[in-house]
Image (tube, rainbow, N blue to C red):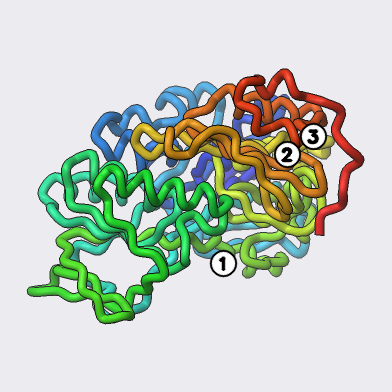
């Protein structure tokens, strides 16, 4: 088997890493190994256009089938790498990986882009038929099929995936209930004002939202789910349940290699692991804050996967990684288009620009007067202005940001002295 670069995980990050190596002039063999039987595809549409039946499977593919041969990227699908080891006697960074089927892949350079898996509920009845998660293409296809005949849908988890899927189910005319254990929706990602906006918006569209509601178990008949039992004794009838309670980074291979892991594979700003001969990128990693360089964050987004993979490719070739771009993210919940730029963690003030109930507004986040991020709902101009400000290192004064009569792009000023994050 050829050496060269072995990329474990045919994800968005894995493909981008391979593409970046070629763009940087690497001519050594590249092998991309994925557990799924599908070639690399887009994940964001799975809970949106694909689930709603507005996009077909072919629209998900990140590259045409002919691309891999043209770029001399060896794509291996349907193979799960179960073991990997660095060679104690070979060149630095070289080794061998083995799959569940017994295939062996020798490599000179190793990249882990293994992603994350769905967090499971360990409550009575969790194995009943009709309880689904939504992480990969097959999950989405099966959920879409079941939505066709379902009438009462319960979504466990009020995060982005849960709310996106709930909006699709409601648009299809299903009876939908969202169950969230926290006291507000999207509690780890947005300010309370945005959480309350989404609660009210989903209620207006006919979705029931239950907060501070813990799932105690599931009821079923003949092996199929019929209801969701809450800790307070409430029983919710259901013939389809979607569990969206977060993900767990896949760190097993990294742990076998003795790499540092802390709720993800620990990497630096150049996507190098604790063994600098091995790189990692995407949802499986935790990394320094992309703006301050301090602390550790785990970012689940296409933008982060692409940026990290680009940096990882440069590191494998011994080159300097490009500057980290401003993080951005989006969530489409029906006609509610949320765009996020920056990271709002550690904010001490937020400014609401516009009226939330109009379903066209923005929330700007600040820390000691410094602009950190924006959540823009159906407000693309605000989003673009703040993304530009964060990219250029300029600021939007908090005292002026709430004035809807003045475009944000007209308010850009010199950024105040940066305040270290804690």
Q: Residue 345's x, y, as percent?
A: 68, 53
Q: Which mark is residue 409?
A: none
- The quadrant of the image that shows the C terminus is bottom right
Task: Tell me the element at label 3.
Answer: loop
Q: Residue at x 30, y 33 (%)?
A: 57
The 10 Å Cα crowd at callout 2, few under 14, some 14 to 19, many 20 or more, is many
Task: Tell me the element at label 1.
Answer: helix
Number of numbered discs: 3
The 10 Å Cα crowd at callout 3, few under 14, some 14 to 19, many 20 or more, is few
Q: Residue 322's x, y, as percent?
A: 78, 33
Q: CA distance from mark 1 to mark 3?
A: 29 Å
Find disc 2 in the rendering and name its residue: 311
Find disc 1 in the rendering and name its residue: 252
| Of callouts 1 and 3, the N-terminal one | 1
Q: Residue at x 77, y 48 (%)?
A: 367
| Pair 3/2: label in front | 3
């Amino acid at each position: 088997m050829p050496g060269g670069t072995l990329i474990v995980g045919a994800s968005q990050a894995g493909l981008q890493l391979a593409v970046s190596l070629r763009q940087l002039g690497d001519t050594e063999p590249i092998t991309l190994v994925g557990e799924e039987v599908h070639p690399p595809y887009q994940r964001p549409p799975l809970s949106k256009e694909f689930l709603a039946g507005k996009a077909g499977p072919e629209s998900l593919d990140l590259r045409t089938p002919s691309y891999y041969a043209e770029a001399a990227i060896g794509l291996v699908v349907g193979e799960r790498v179960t073991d990997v080891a660095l060679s104690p006697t070979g060149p630095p960074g070289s080794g061998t990986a083995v799959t569940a089927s017994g295939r062996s892949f020798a490599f000179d350079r190793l990249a882990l882009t293994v992603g994350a898996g769905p967090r499971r509920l360990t409550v009575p009845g969790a194995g009943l038929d009709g309880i689904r998660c939504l992480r990969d293409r097959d999950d989405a296809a099966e959920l879409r099929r079941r939505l066709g005949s379902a009438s009462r849908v319960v979504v466990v988890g009020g995060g982005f995936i849960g709310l996106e899927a709930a909006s699709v189910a409601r648009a299809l005319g299903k009876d939908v209930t969202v169950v969230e254990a926290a006291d507000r929706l999207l509690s780890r990602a947005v300010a309370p004002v945005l959480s309350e906006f989404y609660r009210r918006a989903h209620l207006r569209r006919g979705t029931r939202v239950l907060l501070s509601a813990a799932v105690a178990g599931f009821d079923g008949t003949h092996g199929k789910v019929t209801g969701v039992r809450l800790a307070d004794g409430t029983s919710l009838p259901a013939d389809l349940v979607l569990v969206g309670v977060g993900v767990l980074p896949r760190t097993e291979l990294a742990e076998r290699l003795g790499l540092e892991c802390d709720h993800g594979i620990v990497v630096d700003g150049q996507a190098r692991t604790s063994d600098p001969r091995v790189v990692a990128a995407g949802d499986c990693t935790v990394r320094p804050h992309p703006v301050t360089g301090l602390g550790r964050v785990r970012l689940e987004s296409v933008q982060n996967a692409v940026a990290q993979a680009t940096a990882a490719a440069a590191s494998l070739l011994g080159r300097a990684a490009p500057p980290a771009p401003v993080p951005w993210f989006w969530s489409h919940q029906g006609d509610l288009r949320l765009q996020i730029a920056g990271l709002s963690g550690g904010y001490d003030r937020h400014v609401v620009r516009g009226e939330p109930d109009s379903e066209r507004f923005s929330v700007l986040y600040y820390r000691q007067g410094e602009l950190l991020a924006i959540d823009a709902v159906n407000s693309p101009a605000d989003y673009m202005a703040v993304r530009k400000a964060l990219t250029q290192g300029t600021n939007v004064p908090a005292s002026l940001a709430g004035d809807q009569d003045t475009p944000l792009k007209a308010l850009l000023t010199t950024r105040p002295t940066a305040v270290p994050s804690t």
